[in-house]
Amino acid sequence: MPAGYARAMQAWMSLFGAIIAEVIGTSALKATAGFTRLLPSLVVLVAYALAFYLLSRTMQTIPMSISYAVWSGVGIVLITLVGYVVYHQRLDGPALLGLGLILAGVLVIHLFSKSVAH
């Protein structure tokens, strides 16, 4: 395996970890009750700290604009799924269309952009 490939894979794994950490932190925000409950508040703080650390590691290899676009786009879609499954929040057609467009944008960046380390 070429060194460049291993570095790119490590960056993408860091980005995936950052996304998961951010989704965990955002999911726990509702449970903090305005940061009045200790355990959920600690989960939010630790998850966000980990997310930003991993995102900063990602940006050492993947350009900032691409890293942040993928992080935020995939995070939006995943947190929407958490809202649907955990909090029973429903979305209408335009909201689902918008989420589909966000996901399509992330796929276009990943599959076709020359700016991304593959």
Image (cartoon, rainbow, N blue to C red):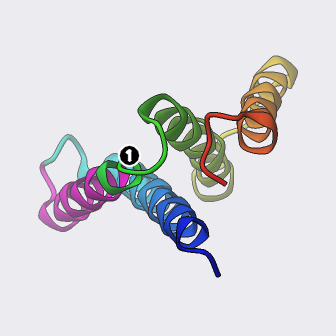
Q: Is residue 112 above or below residue 30?
A: above
Residue shown at 81% from the left, 33% from the top? 104
Image position of 63 (left or right of 117): left
Report if residue 97 lies within the magenta region: no
- Residue drawn at the location 55% of the way across and 60% of the way down: 12
Q: Specify whether residue 37 is painted magenta.
A: yes
Extent of the magenta region: 36-55
Picture coordinates of residue 1, whole percent (x, y): 65, 82
Inspect the image, locate mark 1, and give the three-letter code of the amino acid beneath it: Met
Name the residue: 51% across, 43% down.
71
In the picture provided, is 37 more to the left or to the right than 51? left
- Label total for image: 1
Residue in view at x 75 percent, y 37 percent? 103
Q: Main secondary structure of the magenta part?
A: helix
Is 104 situated above or below 53?
Answer: above
Between 85 and 77, the one nearer to me in the picture: 77
Q: Quadrant of the C terminus?
A: bottom right
Q: Position of residue 84 (x, y in %)?
A: 68, 48
CA neighbours of label 1 inside 10 A, class few (<14), some (14 to 19), many (20+) = some
Q: Is residue 84 above or below residue 85?
A: above
- Indicate the quadrant where residue 24 lies: bottom left
Identity of the residue furthest to the top in this view? 94
Q: Is residue 26 left or right of residue 92?
A: left
Along the line of sight, the residue nearer the viewer: 90 or 18:
18
Image coords of residue 60 (percent x, y):
35, 50
Instruction: Give the secondary structure at mark 1.
Output: loop
Residue that numbered label 1 is attached to: 59
